[in-house]
Image (tube, rainbow, N blue to C red):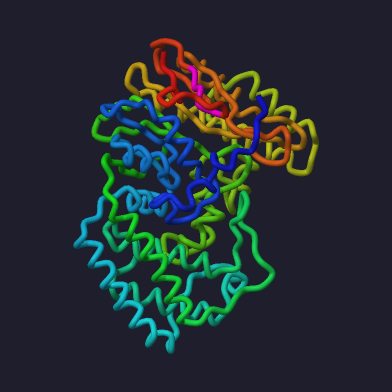
Amino acid sequence: MKVTQRSDYTFKYNKKLGRHGWLRLTPAYSVKLVKEIIDNIRGSSFILDPFSGTATTGLVAAEHGLSAHCFDINPFLIWLGNAKCRHYSNDELSFLKAGIELSLAECKEFVKQDHWLPDIHNITRWWCEHTLKVLAALRQALVNQFGEPKKEDVSALAWIAFCRLIIETSAAAFNHVSLSFHDEVTKYEIEQIEFWYLKIVDAIAQSASEDIAGSATVYFADCREPVSINDVKYSHIVTSPPYPNRISYIRELRPYMYWTKFLDTASEAGELDWKAIGGTWGVATSRLQNWESNGVELSDSLKRVVSQILETEEKNALLMANYVWKYFHDMHLHLQNLRSNLKKGAVLSYIVGNSSFYGVQVHTEKLLEDSLKSLGFTNIGSKVIRKRNSKKELFEYCVYAIYEDRGKYEPRFFGAKQPKGEQLALL
């Protein structure tokens, strides 16, 4: 079977799907992919996504009438995820719209004044000074009506719309794996900003008015450590951890997090990324140079890969070798401590991508299989989902396993058309 790029299995599929399209984040994985994985999960099941990101798994589960918990260490993503998964009453949405109208009226007066701007390096690369003045005025008007962001109530929708607005009016381009910049910034008048913002708010409010049958909550948690939420034991893990490719969430999140004051300085961004698996932004890169394992014994296969990267003698060979070693070290800790959260017979589905460093292939799916085997999981395997880009050696996989053998498990939902109800087979 020929493996294709399958854009419907990427973030591109999510852009016009209600709550899933509220805010763009390129590494987010496909709603369609999650739907196919959970299609046969019973209503009594409890799902965990230990790498929540934009809460795609949690929201899809809730939309299907299921219960889900999600973990993340990034406060902005926790706030965003809970806003996406929340139930909103008609009274709350009426309050939102009234507050937006008052904010836009105040904005006309505030634009004549100077207001706070985030400390983003080279900010005029993102927005021209005129547009920044309008955005700053609108932000202050929203603060007056709804307070600063971080509240987990209907006011979050006003701020999510503002986050969407700042990207739509910026020179940033999000049309590929990571962001880049157009050559010129565009000047927007206040009337254009108001029109655009109202359009975004209306779209968000419309999808927020549609009720969700199930429930999902995002919690602050480091997935490398034992975590217990109300003593819940999970029957399914459906997730997509960061890939070992040095692409950090924090790079794309920074504009949102600065404008909403979840971040104040670049050093804070680096500290947050150092805590994330696979993070290499700012201080995380320098710390990798001297990183050493805390004694977790990993597979011979991983040791060979790390040695091969070192043997290339490239300028950053040590950095990249440590990066790969730490990534799988952290993932092993995650899988090790995850076991205490699982029901017997729990099914794991991990969407991951492989990598290449200086010509050395890093087979993420096989290395994670090694960790799962050493930790006592059963029915372990992986299946290719799609080709990731023009490089023929880069693919996306589903790595699967069971916590205690309960029969043969084989995910048959990727790439081939299956009769409805057979996307996930637990036989």
Report the span colored magenta: 410-414
Residue shown at the point (54%, 68%) measured from the top left: 120
Question: Position of 23 compared to 210: left or right?
Answer: right
Q: Nearer the viewer, residue 250 or 275?
A: 250
Q: Residue 356: percent from the left, percent from the top? A: 70, 35
Q: Residue 185: percent from the left, percent from the top? A: 62, 73
Q: Main secondary structure of the magenta part?
A: loop
Question: Position of 39 compared to 209: left or right?
Answer: right
Q: Nearer the viewer, residue 271 or 176?
A: 176
Furthest-front residue in view?
419
Vertical arrangement, residue 104 with respect to residue 126, above or below: below
Q: In the rendered view of the protein, which quadrant contains the C terminus?
A: top left
Vertical arrangement, residue 188 with respect to residue 246, above or below: below
Let me know if residue 411 is in the magenta part. yes
Residue shown at the point (51%, 46%) measured from the top left: 13
Let me know if residue 158 is in the magenta part. no
Q: In the rendered view of the protein, which quadrant contains the N terminus?
A: top right
Question: Position of 28 compared to 156: left or right?
Answer: right
Write down the quadrant of residue 343 in the picture. top left
Residue shown at the point (52%, 66%) measured from the top left: 168
Furthest-left residue in view?
91
